[in-house]
Image (cartoon, coloured by chain):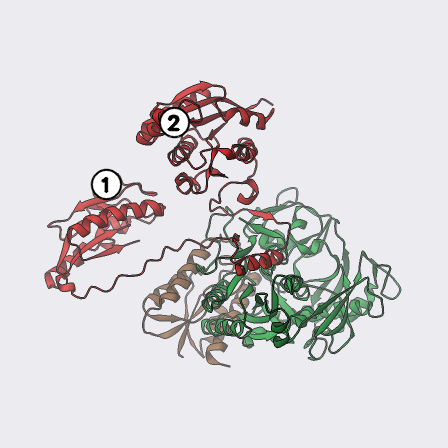
C-alpha cells in the first residue's frame, strides 16, 4: 500500500520565518516538510508522509479569513492529499483560531479527514472542537513531542477511516459525541475514587459533563408598562421578504436589524422566516405568529405599553453557537439601551 | 454486626445422574432434582436445565434473573428473606457462596423481553455474566397463566434453585473467607473521626410489573426511603423483579454482590468512613418522587454525611428521581457522585439523560446504551431466539443471511449497569 | 385530588372508564406526550412521570399519564419534565412497525400496571 499523503498547515513562527513582524505573510506552499513536519514524518514511519506544507502568517489569516481560506484550500487541493493537519498551535490564540478555521474549511471543501492540536484554553478550541478533532496539547511549544505522540496515531486512524475511540483514549477534546469504552476498573470503584477526590477538594473529572446551563436571573419587573418602550426580538428568523441580509437557515453567523416604523402587521407579502429548523408555513403565512407586531400595536393604541421600539433584531437560533448568540446580543442590547428601550420581549420557536 | 462470606470457588458445572454435589470446585447438578423442585409450582408446566460456561458458543435469552447460589451456615435468617426464608434480619453470621456460579432463569413473560447473555464473541464483553458458570433454567408456564403470576413463578423458581445449589456448599470448607464488619452510627463516627463520612444511596426500581424490587419481601414502591445495613443487602435482603431494559436493571446477583458497597468497605477506614446505606424508590407518581427524595436528603443529613454515592436503576422516569436526589442532597452541603447510564442515540450525539442539573457535577457513566453491536450467531441458544430476531433486536432486517444480529447494547444483560457493576463507560 | 387519565391504551380505557375520568384517543405515543404538554401549559398539573416504565418510547406504542382535572397555574418544573420527555422520546426510533396482536397486548398490560401504580398512589389505596 502506498503511503498516506498529508499536507500540514503551520504559521510563520513554526516555519522559522519570523515572529510578529512576519505575521502578515501570505499563504505559501512548499514541497515536503517544514519545521514540526519532520518529527511528524518520523512518527508516521512507513505509513504516512507529509508531502507538502502550507505556511501562512497569523495576522494575514486573521484579517483575511475568507480570502486566506480560499487560497489555502486551493494549495491543498493542488497536492490532492489524503489528510490535512494544522498546527499544533499550543496556546497561540490567533494561530489556534487559524488552525481550527482552516481545518474545518478544508474538511468542508475537500471532504478529507483533518486534525489539529492546541491547548485547551486556546480560543480556537471552544470554537471548533465540535466540528473537527482537536488534540489537547500542552500550553507551549515545549510540548511538541507530547503533541506529536498523540496526533500522529490519531491522524493515521482518521486517514485510514478506522473507528475513533473515546476522547480520553484517543487524546482529542470531548466533542459532545458520546463514545463507549471499557475502563480498567468497574464503575463503583471509579465512583468511590471520584467521591474521595471531591471530598478532599482535589481535581476530578466527571465522566459525563452536564449540559451547560447558562441560566440568567430575570430582571426585576417593569413597574410602569404604560410608559415603557418595548422592543421585540426573536431567534425565530423573521426577516423582510427575500431575506436581504441572507441570514443562514441554521448556525447563523449574523443577526438582522429591521425598521418597523409604521408597520402595523407583518403580512405575507412583506415578511417571512429564514429559520430552517421548523415548518415555516405558518410563519410565512403570518410572521406575527413569531414576532407579534400586530398585538404590540394594539397594546400601543390601547395605552397598555408606552410604545413599540421602531426596530427589531432577529436571528436564527437553529444550531447557532452560544458564543455567536452572546456576541449578537451584546451588540444589539447596547444599541437598544442607547435608544432608551426599557424592556424586550424575546420570542423563540 | 459482622458477616463472613465463605467463598467456595466454582470452576465448572457438570451434569450428573447421582445426587447433586460440589466436589473439588465442580458443581455437579442432577437435572431431575432441579426439575422436580421447579415443577412443585403448579403454574410451571415444563422446565429444562442447561449449562453455559465462559467461552462457549452459547446465547441465553431472554434472561429473567441471575442469582448467586448461597446458603446460611451460621447466624440468624436465611436466603432471600420474605420469599424463601422468614423475615429474620440477615447480614450477620456466616454465609457460604458458590463463587463463580450463577443461576440464570429464562422464560417468556411478555413478547418484547430483552436480556441477552453471550458466553463468547463480542457480546460477551458487554455482560458480566459471560464470566460466570451458569446453570440455565428455562421454564414455560401452564396455559393461560397471567403475566403477573408468571413473573412471580419464575422469580421464586430462580430463588429456589439458587437455594438448592447453595445448600450443597453448606458443609464445605470455603476456599476463602471475606469478613465485613459494620458498626453502629455512634461507634462508626468515633472510630475514624478524621475521615470524611460517606453513605450509599441506592435507588430501587419500583414502577410496576417487570419493574419491581423487593426488600425483605416488601414491594419497594410501597416503602418510604429508609436506612438498611449494607450487610443485609450483601446477605440477600434485596431481590429483583425486573427484566425489561436489561442493560441497566439489577438482577438479584447484582444486589447480592453490590459493588458500591464492596468498594466502600474497601475504602472504609482508609480514605473514608462508611456510615450507612439509604434505599429509596423510583415511583411513577411525582409526589412520591418528591417525598422519597426529601427523605434521602434528610437521612443523608441525619447520618452526618459529608458525601454520598447515588446509584440509579432504569431509564427515563428514574432520571428525574436521580436529579431530585442529587439536587436535594447537594443542597444540604453533602457532596455527591452519581452513577447512571446514557441514551445518547445510536450516533452518540443526543442529550444523554432525560433530566439534568448543574449540581450533578460528578458523574460515573455505564456507557451509551444506544450503541449498536453486531452479535454473530452462536451454536446453541438457550431460551427463545425468535424474540431477538423479530422483536427485541429492532427493525425487520436486523438479522442478516449469516445469522448476525444487529442490536443496541441495551438488549444485553448488565451492559450499562448503574450500580457500577461493570466496566463499560463513555466519554 | 380529581384527575384525568390521558391514554392511548385501550386496556386502560376498558379497565378504568367506568370508575375514573379517562381521556382516551387512538393516537401515537408522541401525541399523548404532546397532548399532556398542552394541558400542562393550560395549568393542569402533571401527576405521573411521562416516561414511566423502562420499555423505551416508540418500542411500546402505549402511554398513559395522570394529570389533575383542575387547571390552575402552569408549573415550570412540570413543563420541563414533559418537554424533556418529548425530546428524549424523539431519540428513539419506532421499533416494531408490524407488531403482533399478542405483543401489543403485553405492552398494553405493562403500561396499565405502571399507571395503576400511579392511580393507587393518588387514591391512596
User: How many neighbours does mark 1 have within 10 angstroms: few (below 14), some (14-19), or many (20 or more)?
Assistant: some
Residue visible at 23% across and 57% down in the picture: A345
Instruction: Determine the image quadrant of residue B420.
Output: bottom right
Label 2 marks a residue whose chain is A
**x%, y% of residue B92?**
72, 74
The colour applied to the residues of chain A in this rendering is red
Alpha carbons under labels 1 and 2: distance apart: 43 Å
Q: Classify A339 as above or below B242.
A: above
The colour applied to the residues of chain B in this rendering is green
Residue visible at 12% across and 62% down in the picture: A227
Report helix, strand or loop for mark 1: loop
Q: Which residue is mark 1?
A: A243
**In the drawing, does residue A253 fall left or right of residue B246?**
left
**In the drawing, does residue B312 fall left or right of residue C8?**
right
Label 1 marks a residue whose chain is A
Q: Which residue is mark 2?
A: A19
Report helix, strand or loop for mark 2: loop
Amino acid at each position: 500500500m502506498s503511503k498516506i499523503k498529508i499536507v500540514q498547515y503551520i504559521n510563520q513562527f513554526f516555519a522559522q520565518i519570523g515572529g510578529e513582524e512576519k505575521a502578515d505573510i501570505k499563504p505559501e506552499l512548499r514541497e515536503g516538510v517544514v519545521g514540526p513536519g519532520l518529527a511528524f514524518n518520523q512518527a508516521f514511519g512507513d505509513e504516512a508522509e507529509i508531502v507538502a506544507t502550507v505556511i501562512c502568517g497569523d495576522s494575514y489569516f486573521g484579517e483575511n479569513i475568507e480570502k486566506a481560506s480560499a487560497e489555502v484550500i486551493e494549495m491543498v487541493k493542488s497536492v490532492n492529499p489524503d489528510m490535512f493537519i494544522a498546527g499544533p498551535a499550543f496556546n497561540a490564540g490567533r494561530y489556534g483560531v487559524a488552525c481550527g478555521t482552516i481545518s474545518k474549511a478544508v474538511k468542508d471543501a475537500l471532504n478529507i479527514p483533518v486534525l489539529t492540536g492546541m491547548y485547551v484554553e486556546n480560543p480556537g478550541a471552544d470554537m471548533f472542537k465540535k466540528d473537527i478533532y482537536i488534540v489537547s496539547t500542552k500550553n507551549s511549544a515545549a510540548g511538541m513531542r507530547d503533541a506529536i505522540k498523540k496526533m500522529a496515531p490519531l491522524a493515521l486512524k482518521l486517514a485510514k477511516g478506522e473507528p475513533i475511540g473515546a476522547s480520553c483514549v484517543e487524546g482529542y477534546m470531548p466533542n459532545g459525541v458520546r463514545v463507549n469504552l471499557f475502563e480498567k476498573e468497574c464503575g463503583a470503584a471509579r465512583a468511590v475514587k471520584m467521591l474521595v477526590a471531591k471530598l478532599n477538594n482535589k481535581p476530578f473529572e466527571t465522566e459525563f459533563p452536564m449540559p451547560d446551563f447558562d441560566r440568567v436571573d430575570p430582571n426585576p419587573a417593569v413597574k410602569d408598562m404604560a410608559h415603557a418602550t418595548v422592543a421585540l426580538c426573536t431567534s425565530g428568523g423573521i426577516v423582510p421578504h427575500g431575506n436581504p441580509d441572507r441570514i443562514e437557515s441554521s448556525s447563523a453567523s449574523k443577526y438582522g436589524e429591521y425598521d418597523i416604523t409604521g408597520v402595523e402587521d407583518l403580512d405575507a407579502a412583506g415578511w417571512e422566516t429564514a429559520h430552517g429548523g421548523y415548518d415555516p408555513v405558518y410563519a410565512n403565512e403570518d410572521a406575527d405568529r413569531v414576532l407579534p407586531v400586530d398585538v404590540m400595536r394594539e397594546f400601543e393604541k390601547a395605552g397598555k405599553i408606552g410604545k413599540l421600539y421602531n426596530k427589531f433584531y432577529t436571528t436564527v437560533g437553529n444550531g447557532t453557537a452560544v458564543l455567536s448568540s452572546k456576541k449578537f446580543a451584546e451588540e444589539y442590547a447596547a444599541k437598544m439601551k442607547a435608544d432608551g428601550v426599557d424592556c424586550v420581549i424575546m420570542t423563540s420557536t | 454486626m459482622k458477616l463472613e462470606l465463605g467463598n467456595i470457588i466454582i470452576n465448572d458445572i457438570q451434569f450428573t445422574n447421582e445426587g447433586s454435589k460440589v466436589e473439588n470446585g465442580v458443581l455437579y447438578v442432577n437435572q431431575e432434582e432441579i426439575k422436580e423442585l421447579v415443577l412443585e409450582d403448579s403454574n410451571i408446566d415444563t422446565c429444562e436445565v442447561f449449562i453455559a460456561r465462559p467461552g462457549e458458543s452459547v446465547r441465553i435469552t431472554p434472561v429473567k434473573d441471575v442469582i448467586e447460589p448461597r446458603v446460611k451456615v451460621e447466624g440468624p435468617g436465611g436466603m432471600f428473606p420474605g420469599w424463601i426464608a422468614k423475615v429474620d434480619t440477615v447480614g450477620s453470621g456466616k454465609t457460604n457462596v458458590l463463587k463463580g456460579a450463577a443461576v440464570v432463569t429464562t422464560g417468556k413473560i411478555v413478547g418484547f423481553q430483552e436480556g441477552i447473555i453471550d458466553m463468547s464473541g463480542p457480546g460477551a464483553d458487554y455482560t458480566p455474566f459471560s464470566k460466570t458458570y451458569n446453570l440455565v433454567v428455562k421454564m414455560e408456564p401452564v396455559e393461560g397463566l397471567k403475566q403477573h403470576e408468571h413473573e412471580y413463578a419464575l422469580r421464586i423458581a430462580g430463588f429456589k434453585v439458587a437455594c438448592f445449589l447453595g445448600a450443597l456448599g453448606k458443609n464445605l470448607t470455603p476456599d476463602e473467607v471475606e469478613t465485613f464488619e459494620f458498626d453502629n452510627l455512634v461507634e462508626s463516627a468515633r472510630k475514624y473521626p478524621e475521615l470524611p463520612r460517606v453513605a450509599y444511596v441506592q435507588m430501587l426500581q419500583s414502577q410496576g410489573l417487570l419493574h419491581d424490587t423487593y426488600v425483605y419481601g416488601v414491594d419497594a414502591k410501597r416503602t418510604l426511603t429508609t436506612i438498611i445495613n449494607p450487610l443485609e443487602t450483601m446477605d440477600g435482603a434485596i431481590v429483583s423483579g425486573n427484566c425489561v431494559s436489561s442493560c441497566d436493571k439489577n438482577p438479584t446477583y447484582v444486589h447480592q454482590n453490590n459493588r458500591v458497597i464492596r468498594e466502600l468497605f474497601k475504602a472504609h477506614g482508609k480514605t473514608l468512613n462508611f456510615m450507612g446505606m439509604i434505599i429509596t424508590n423510583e415511583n411513577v407518581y411525582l409526589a412520591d418522587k418528591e417525598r422519597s427524595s426529601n427523605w434521602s436528603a434528610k437521612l443523608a443529613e441525619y447520618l452526618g454525611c459529608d458525601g454520598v454515592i447515588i446509584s440509579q436503576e432504569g431509564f427515563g422516569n428514574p432520571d428525574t428521581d436521580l436529579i431530585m436526589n442529587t439536587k436535594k442532597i447537594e443542597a444540604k452541603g453533602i457532596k455527591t457522585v452519581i452513577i447512571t447510564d446514557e441514551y445518547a442515540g445510536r450516533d452518540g450525539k443526543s442529550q444523554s439523560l432525560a433530566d439534568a442539573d448543574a449540581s450533578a457535577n460528578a458523574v460515573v457513566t455505564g456507557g451509551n446504551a444506544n450503541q449498536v453491536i453486531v452479535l454473530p450467531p452462536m451454536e446453541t441458544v438457550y431460551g427463545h431466539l425468535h424474540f431477538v430476531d423479530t422483536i427485541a433486536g429492532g427493525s425487520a432486517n436486523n438479522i442478516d443471511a449469516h445469522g448476525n444480529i444487529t442490536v443496541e447494547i441495551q438488549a444485553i444483560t448488565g451492559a450499562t449497569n448503574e450500580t457500577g457493576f461493570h466496566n463499560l463507560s463513555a466519554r | 385530588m380529581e384527575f384525568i387519565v390521558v391514554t392511548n391504551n385501550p386496556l386502560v380505557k376498558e379497565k378504568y372508564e367506568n370508575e375514573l375520568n379517562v381521556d382516551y384517543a387512538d393516537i401515537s405515543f408522541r401525541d399523548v406526550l404532546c397532548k399532556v404538554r398542552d394541558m400542562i401549559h393550560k395549568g393542569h398539573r402533571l401527576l405521573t412521570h411521562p416516561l414511566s416504565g423502562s420499555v423505551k418510547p416508540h418500542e411500546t406504542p402505549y402511554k398513559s399519564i395522570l394529570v389533575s382535572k383542575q387547571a390552575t397555574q402552569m408549573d415550570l418544573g412540570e413543563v420541563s419534565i414533559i418537554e424533556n420527555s418529548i425530546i428524549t422520546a424523539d431519540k428513539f426510533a419506532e421499533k416494531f412497525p408490524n407488531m403482533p396482536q399478542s405483543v401489543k397486548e403485553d405492552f398494553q398490560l405493562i403500561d396499565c400496571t405502571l399507571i395503576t401504580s400511579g392511580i393507587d398512589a393518588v387514591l391512596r389505596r
